[in-house]
Image (tube, helix red, strand yellow):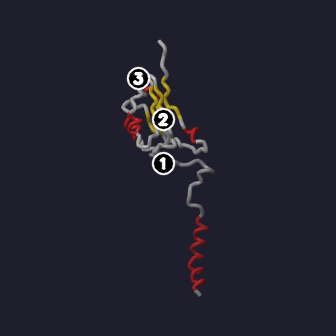
Amino acid sequence: MRCLESIAYLFPRIWRTLARGPQTVAYPLSPIDLPAGYRGRVHIRAELCRGCGLCVRDCPAFGLELEREDRETFRLIYHPDRCAYCGQCEESCNFGAIYLDNDFVHGTFNREALIEVLVDRKRTNK
C-alpha cells in the first residue's frame, strides 16, 4: 500500500519534470550568453605599461608575475589559471594599462598553454 502511495506521489512530478525540458544553457552546442558585467581575461595596453608592479602587488590570487632586470627591462606574465577575475589589477593600475574584458578563457589540458606574456620590454642598445 505504501509503495502505491509513493508511486502516485512521484509519478506526476516526474512527468512534469520531463515535459518541462532542459533548464540549463546549451553552451557547448551554442554560443554562451555572458552578462554585461562579466569580467573575463586580463588584457593590457602594452604601450601604457610602466612596469611599476602595482598590479602584481595587489593581485590576491598571484595571477600576475613581474620579471625585472632593470628599470626599463621587464616582462609582465599573466596566469589565467590562478586569476580570480576580481578586477583588482585594473583598479591598481595608475596608468590605465591593464583591463578586464569579457573574453572567455577556454579550458585546456596543458596548464603551460594558458600562460601569456602581456608585456615584454627588452633592453635597447644605444
Q: How much space separates mark 2 and mark 1, taking CA atoms?
A: 19 Å
Which three-letter amino acid code belongs to the residue tagged 2? His
Which three-letter amino acid code belongs to the residue tagged 3? Arg
| Disc on the earlier residue, 2 or 1 | 1
Q: Residue at x 60, y 42 (%)?
A: 110
Horizontal placement of 28 versus 50: left or right?
right
Rendered view: 6 above or below 105: below
Rendered view: 10 above or below 99: below
Which three-letter amino acid code belongs to the residue tagged 1? Pro
Q: Pinpoint residue 87: horizontal percent, then vertical percent.
A: 42, 41
For mark 1, what is the residue?
Answer: 35
* Total count of labels: 3
Find residue 90 and report its image quarter: top left
For mark 3, what is the residue?
Answer: 71
For mark 2, what is the residue?
Answer: 43
Q: Between tags 3 and 2, which lies in front?
A: 3
Q: Residue at x 46, y 37 (%)?
A: 64
* Circle 1: element type: loop
| Disc on the earlier residue, 1 or 3 | 1
